[in-house]
Image: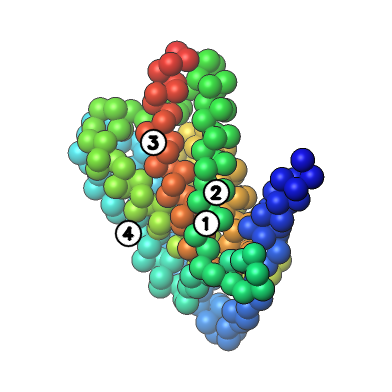
């Protein structure tokens, strides 16, 4: 019993606590420019996000809005300054690109959110906001909604855990980026989405701090959002 506990503790430390060594310092002028670009992108992205999720399910404008939103996050994330892929601890003394750890964390997040949906689905005022978002897949093209979900997941990580995380600096970047991410999501008027953004923001923010890059957050976000899109409608229908 001790060995599994030790393995779990070591995994958590490597994936979420102990940063890999790196030096991502940049000149003051580049740092100031990054902050200006991220501020403008955040304002525009929040407005586009709020407008997109207010489009009625089944309306083809939702697809255009989703693609526009992804374009804002991706363009802003890349334009703000250099982004890094990141490295992860291995069992030895070396480092590798972060793939296995974010996959495992994504699976854990999916399990937690799915279990939570069983409870939430039995409370109408909590399930309602979730169903409002899922209705875009129920009454539209699931394939297109999934593609937009994936592209936006990548874009959000490039911006929030990439450009914005670097623009915050060394003082509480996980807290600041998570709160900003949740507030931007709150522009949709959907409290359940904002709550999900808080939880996901902490998880991906910790990965960003440890790995020094955006690959791990992207993998976790894409796997989580894909699973939520496919699993939540089934879970909510079962408990309804």
Q: Which residue is mark 4?
A: 71
Judge left or right: residue 210 versus residue 111: right
- x then y, percent, for residue 12: 68, 53
- x then y, percent, for residue 111: 54, 35
| Labels 3 and 1: the sequence-earlier one | 1
Residue 100, labelled with which disc?
Answer: 1
Residue 104, labelled with which disc?
Answer: 2
Judge left or right: residue 48 versus residue 179: left
Asked whether disc 3 touches disc 1, contact meaning CB atoms under 8 Å apart, the reply is no
Residue 229, labelled with which disc?
Answer: 3
Disc 4 versus disc 3: nearer the observer = 3
Q: Which one is in front, 135 or 105?
A: 105
| Labels 4 and 3: the sequence-earlier one | 4
| Labels 4 and 2: the sequence-earlier one | 4
User: How far, Cα to Cα, is label 4 from label 2?
Assistant: 28 Å
Q: Is residue 98 above or below residue 191?
A: below
Would you call the spot at circle 4 few (<14 residues within 10 Å), some (14-19), or many (20 or more)? some
Q: At x 40% / y 18%, what residue is drawn?
A: 237
Q: Is residue 3 above or below residue 26?
A: above
């Amino acid at each position: 019993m001790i060995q599994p506990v030790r393995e779990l503790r070591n995994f958590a430390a490597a994936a979420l606590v102990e940063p890999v060594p790196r030096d991502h310092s940049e000149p003051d002028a580049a740092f100031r420019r990054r902050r200006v670009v991220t501020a403008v992108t955040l304002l525009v992205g929040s407005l586009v996000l709020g407008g997109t999720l207010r489009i009625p399910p089944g309306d083809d404008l939702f697809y255009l809005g989703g693609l526009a939103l992804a374009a804002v996050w991706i363009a802003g994330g890349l334009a703000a300054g250099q982004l890094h892929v990141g490295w992860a601890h291995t069992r030895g003394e070396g480092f590798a690109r972060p793939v296995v750890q974010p996959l495992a964390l994504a699976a854990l997040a999916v399990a937690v959110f799915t279990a939570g949906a069983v409870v939430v689905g039995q409370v109408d005022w909590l399930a309602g906001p979730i169903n409002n978002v899922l209705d875009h897949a129920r009454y539209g093209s699931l394939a297109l909604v999934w593609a937009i979900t994936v592209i936006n997941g990548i874009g959000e990580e490039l911006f929030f855990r990439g450009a914005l995380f670097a623009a915050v600096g060394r003082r509480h970047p996980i807290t600041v980026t998570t709160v900003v991410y949740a507030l931007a999501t709150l522009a949709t008027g959907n409290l359940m989405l904002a709550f999900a953004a808080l939880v996901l923001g902490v998880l991906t923010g910790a990965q960003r701090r440890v790995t020094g890059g955006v690959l791990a957050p992207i993998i976790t976000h894409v796997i989580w959002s894909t699973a939520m899109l496919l699993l939540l409608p089934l879970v909510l229908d079962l408990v309804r």
